């Protein structure tokens, strides 16, 4: 995914967003692997809050960096999920998966807001207006 978005991230001066997500996901995978292979039950019990928290952090930081209220709201929705999770201990994985999947589907289907493009002179005519 980083390779597919690198051109636009470079054009928008947002390469740090790709590095942020790479760092968050590698940290989450490392913690998850530590819990599984190190047999740390504290980590395994808290996998859902860990992943919801990591994605909330990523969306909120990315939202502020891109100037997008859509991503900030998505991060706040993930944070709200963190508050609800302790009340549904037997359904944590279903709730976590539903929140993450639901936000991704909404972000994939809706046009989200962000500041305007910086370097329009680098874009081809098709990239500027793909409907022509």
Image (cartoon, rainbow, N blue to C red):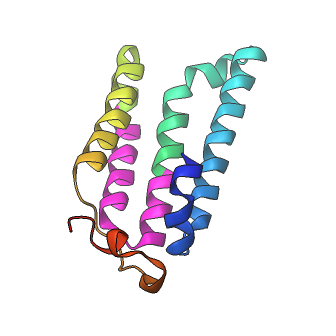
Q: Residue at x 21, y 65 (%)?
A: 131
Q: Position of residue 50 (x, y in %)?
A: 55, 35
Which of these two is toward me, 127 or 44? 127
Q: Residue at x 57, y 70 (%)?
A: 10
Question: In the shown orientation, is residue 118 left or right of residue 81?
Answer: right
Counting the numbered discs, the total is 0
Question: Please, is residue 103 above or below residue 34 in the view?
Answer: below
Question: In which quadrant of the rendered view does residue 126 lie?
Answer: bottom left
Q: Quadrant of residue 40?
A: top right
On the rendered structure, is 48 left or right of 104? right
Comparing 15 with 40, the one in front is 15
Q: Position of residue 42 (x, y in %)?
A: 65, 22
Quarter of the picture containing the N terminus is top right
* x and y, in percent, of residue 70 in the image: 30, 60
Q: Which stretch is magenta?
A: 57-84
Instruction: Please name the predominant secondary structure of the magenta segment in the image.
Output: helix
In the rendered image, the residue lying farthest to the right is 38
Please, is residue 132 above or below residue 95 in the view? below
Which quadrant is the C terminus positioned in?
bottom left
Based on the picture, tell me whether residue 78 belongs to the magenta stretch. yes
Above or below — where is 59 with respect to 97?
below
- Residue 119, relative to residue 89: is it above or below? below
> Where is residue 16 drawn, in percent x and y?
61, 65
Q: Residue at x 48, y 45 (%)?
A: 55
Q: Can residue 75 be found in the magenta stretch?
A: yes
Query: What residue is drawn where x is 45% and y is 86%?
Result: 121
């Amino acid at each position: 995914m980083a390779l597919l978005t690198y051109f636009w991230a470079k054009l928008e001066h947002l390469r740090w967003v790709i590095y942020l997500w790479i760092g968050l996901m590698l940290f989450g995978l490392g913690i998850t692997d530590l819990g599984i292979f190190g047999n740390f039950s504290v980590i395994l019990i808290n996998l859902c809050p860990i992943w919801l928290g990591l994605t909330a952090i990523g969306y909120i930081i990315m939202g502020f960096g891109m100037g997008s209220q859509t991503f900030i709201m998505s991060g706040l929705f993930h944070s709200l999920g963190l508050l609800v999770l302790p009340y549904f201990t037997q359904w944590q994985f279903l709730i976590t998966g539903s929140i993450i999947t639901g936000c991704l589907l909404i972000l994939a289907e809706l046009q989200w807001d962000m500041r305007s493009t910086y370097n329009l002179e680098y874009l081809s005519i098709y990239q500027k207006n793909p409907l022509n």
